[in-house]
Structures are given as structure tokens and as C-alpha cells.
Image: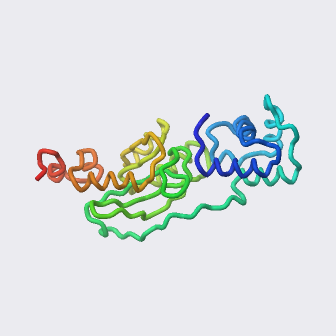
Amino acid sequence: MAPLSAAIALRIALAARALDGVEPAQLLQALIRCAGEPLTADRLGKLRGNRLRQCLESLPEPPAALPTDAAWQRAVALLKGRGVPAPPQPVVVPYRDGDMPDSVRIACTSDSGEQINAGFNSCTRLLIYQVSPQEIRLIDLRNAEFSGSREERLQQRADCLHDCQLLYTLSIGGPAAAKVVRAGAHLIKLERPTPARAVAGELQRVLATAAPPWLAKAMGAEPPQRQRFSPENRS
């Protein structure tokens, strides 16, 4: 089973609670049968209540009794994101060009908080940080939920990276990775969910010492400038 984002897991848990007698695992199985994997906000937004009910009834171990129509409508609304409490939004700090000399701009795929906890193909937003040897600043929250075909959605996400040098994500497909590279962002895949500021802190330490050539290039350093980032040129 494909991993669930924190936001999608919350929707499923709340919907199962509304469906008295339906276990979260049963609802999850029915959702996968009905909507396919991975379960994303876009797929849940297209759910048909009758189709989901049929999938639930056809499970090898279906619920002993199905919920009332009112409970079912409430659960489907929650799965679509209606009535789900919004988590607190991270605080964005204004930024102007030139505020942070020798800085780099990074994007992190996220579903909640300041966490890198989603893949590029299914994330709900992008956390945008400006990182310099002296400061880490969250400068933007960019919506990553778009309509259209899969190809169009991936391109719109890649377009959000037009001013970013690095992208941190948990996973990404081949076609999407090609779009990210064409957008001018260097791709970094993480093995597990990670606080975005921890990743930014690691990058900050690299900037303060000796950035590798690929990072110097991403920052737009000219060849003479890159020499100061190489180990043999450390003071």
C-alpha cells in the first residue's frame, strides 16, 4: 500500500469515526478499491458515495451493518476535505531580494506543518525557504493542488519551482523529475519524513563551510567563485 500523507490519514480517521461500525482499516480498503492508489486529495475529491458504499459492501470482511444515510453523507464530506479542521499554518516572513547575501532558495514538499512529509507528485503545498550561512527564513507557502490531467498537474507543480535552486522531497516519478530539472531545480530525495528546518539547517552548515560544486553551480556562482567552495581552497 502506498504511504498516506498526514492530511489524508486525518480525513480517513475522521470519516471512519463518523461511520459507526466501520473500522478505519475497512474504510481504507474500500477507498483503495474505489479510488485507487495513491490516495490523494484530488482522488478523494472525486469520490462517489454510492460507489464507495458498494466497495465497502464487497470487502471479504464487510461491516456487520452499514451506517445511516446521514452518517454516510457526513463521512463522504470529510473524505473530500469538507469540515476537516485546518492545521495551524507556518508563519511566513517577508523577503526582498538582497535581504540575505550568499543565500539559496529551496522548496520542500509538504502536507502539514513545516514537515517534508509528501512526495512531489501528490503533495498539497510547497514550503519555500531562503537559506544563508546566517539565517533560515520561510518566505512562502505555495499551493500544489491543481486541476487538469496528471501531466498538467505535474507541470504546474514544476512551474512553482521557477525561482528555486533545490527541491527536497520524499519521492518523485521519472517524468516529474525531468520537469523539475527543466525548471532549474536540483532534486534531493529523502528516505523518511523530516522537519524542513532540520534539512535547511544542514544546508546552512554546508553554506558556511565549503559548498560542493553542484551546490555552488545551483547558487549561480561563476567558475572563479566556485573555487572558494572547494576543499583545497579552505582557509
Position of 225 with respect to 207 (left or right) is left
Q: Residue at x 59, y 52 (%)?
A: 146
Position of 25 with respect to 230 (left or right) is right
Q: Coloured how?
A: rainbow
Q: Find residue 69 and report its horizontal and vertical position in percent.
A: 88, 50
Q: Residue at x 30, y 50 (%)?
A: 218
Judged from this view, the residue extending furthest toward the top is 60
- Considering only vertical position in the picture, is 129 above or below 51? below
Q: Residue at x 43, y 69 (%)?
A: 93
For residue 131, what is the image quadrant? bottom left
Count of numbered tags: 0
- Considering only vertical position in the picture, is 179 above or below 139? above
For residue 52, what is the image quadrant? top right
101 vs 75, nearest the viewer: 75
22 vs 171, nearest the viewer: 22
Position of 162 with respect to 69 (left or right) is left
Q: Find residue 83 and report its horizontal and vertical position in percent.
A: 72, 60
Q: Find residue 101 and report its horizontal and vertical position in percent.
A: 26, 65
147 vs 123, nearest the viewer: 123
Q: Find residue 57 and report its horizontal and vertical position in percent.
A: 83, 35
The quadrant of the rendering that contains the N terminus is top right
Q: Residue at x 30, y 66 (%)?
A: 100
